[in-house]
Image (cartoon, grey):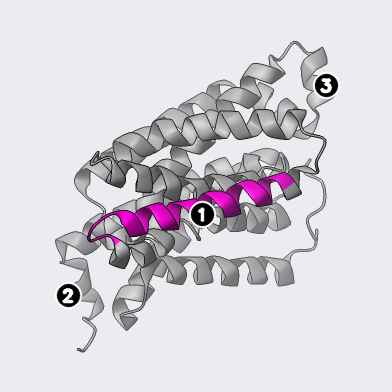
Amino acid sequence: MTPPGLAELLTLPFMQRALLAGLLSGALGGLLGSFAVLRQLSFFSDALGHSALLGISLGLLLGLNPTIVLIPFAVLFALVVGQLVERSRLPSDALLNIIYSSALAIAVVVLSLVPGQRSSIEQLLFGDILAVGWGDLALIGLLLVVVATYLVLTRRSQILLTLDPALATAQGVAVGWQRLLFVVVLAVVVALSIKAVGVLLISAFLVIPACSSRLLSPNFTLYMLLACLLGASCGVLGLLFSGLLNLPSGPCVVILQLLAFLTALVVSPRRAGALG
């Protein structure tokens, strides 16, 4: 089958929804990822992504809407894992590795027990942004507005907490509550992005644009804005690339993010120096 041309591609309703989803989810991932990277939560977001498959599997097994089950499951999972990381004497990366690999294994077994769902495992792992509906878009758009508003209103506290937690505490920032709220928001973003991005690629959506932006940005504000812009533009261009060449959408977006990162690595004079 010959892939459609660009003009024909843009007239397809499912592609229009997909492009909007790529724009919104890419911007949201870049914005939230800019904080997650500096707060060393990259691996934590990866664990959340892998555990999300378990929430989806439980929803399907119980005959419930997976999205309805996934959001509270992801939030609860994030809170429990956060407490385990703080209280355990094990290194956090080792503990998170145990948790996310175990959750992924259990999820695949549970999913295999659900009639007619064996063939959907690949779609859940790598995402299917072309299947995103208007309801999904409304949720992602609403979350983007809420997260952006929250970060703007608490900008000073967020920057202090990200760059110097001790100073944030001295300045009266409620560090514990801010960290807890950020983890909850991160869990919700991961849960809503799974359908479009997939379990295995969700971490890349959060991490790669932020890392590229850090190589190029001399200050925190530009760092956030550039991460958001890179996430959104790579989401849209990656989808167009995948549609024109009839390739998987999620992996194409991540490959484009990787190319942007390599470009930033080459042209950056800072080499990920400290943000001013």
Instruction: Provide the secondary structure element on which disc 2 rests.
Output: helix
Residue under label 1: 104
Q: What residue sits 24% from the left and 38% below the top?
A: 64
Is 198 inside the magenta-drawn segment?
Answer: no
- Which amino acid lies under the numbered mark 2 shown in the image of this protein? Glu
Of the residues under marks 3 and 2, which one precedes in the sequence? Answer: 2
Q: Which residues are magenta?
A: 95-117
Is 106 inside the magenta-drawn segment?
Answer: yes
Residue under label 3: 167
Question: Taking 95 as reference, is 104 left or right?
Answer: left
- Which amino acid lies under the numbered mark 3 shown in the image of this protein? Leu
Q: What residue sits 79% from the left and 63% below the top?
A: 269
Q: In the image shown, does 151 or 122 lie closer to the viewer?
A: 122
- Which amino acid lies under the numbered mark 1 shown in the image of this protein? Leu
Of the residues under marks 1 and 2, which one precedes in the sequence? Answer: 2
Is residue 81 visible in the rendered image? The answer is yes
Residue under label 2: 8
Rounded to the nearest angstrom, the CA distance separating label 3 from label 1 is 38 Å
Rounded to the nearest angstrom, the CA distance separating label 3 from label 2 is 55 Å
Q: Is residue 188 above or below residue 259?
A: above
Is residue 42 visible in the rendered image? The answer is no
Where is residue 140 shown, x and y percent of the image?
Answer: 35, 41
Where is residue 13 shown, x and y percent of the image?
Answer: 15, 60
Rounded to the nearest angstrom, the CA distance separating label 1 from label 2 is 39 Å
* Eye-nearest disc, 1 or 2: 1
As drawn, the residue found furthest toward the top would be: 172
* Eye-nearest disc, 3 or 2: 3
How would you rate the neighbour count of disc 1 (Cα within 10 Å): few for under 14, some for 14-19, many for 20 or more?
many
Where is residue 175 shown, x and y percent of the image?
Answer: 70, 19
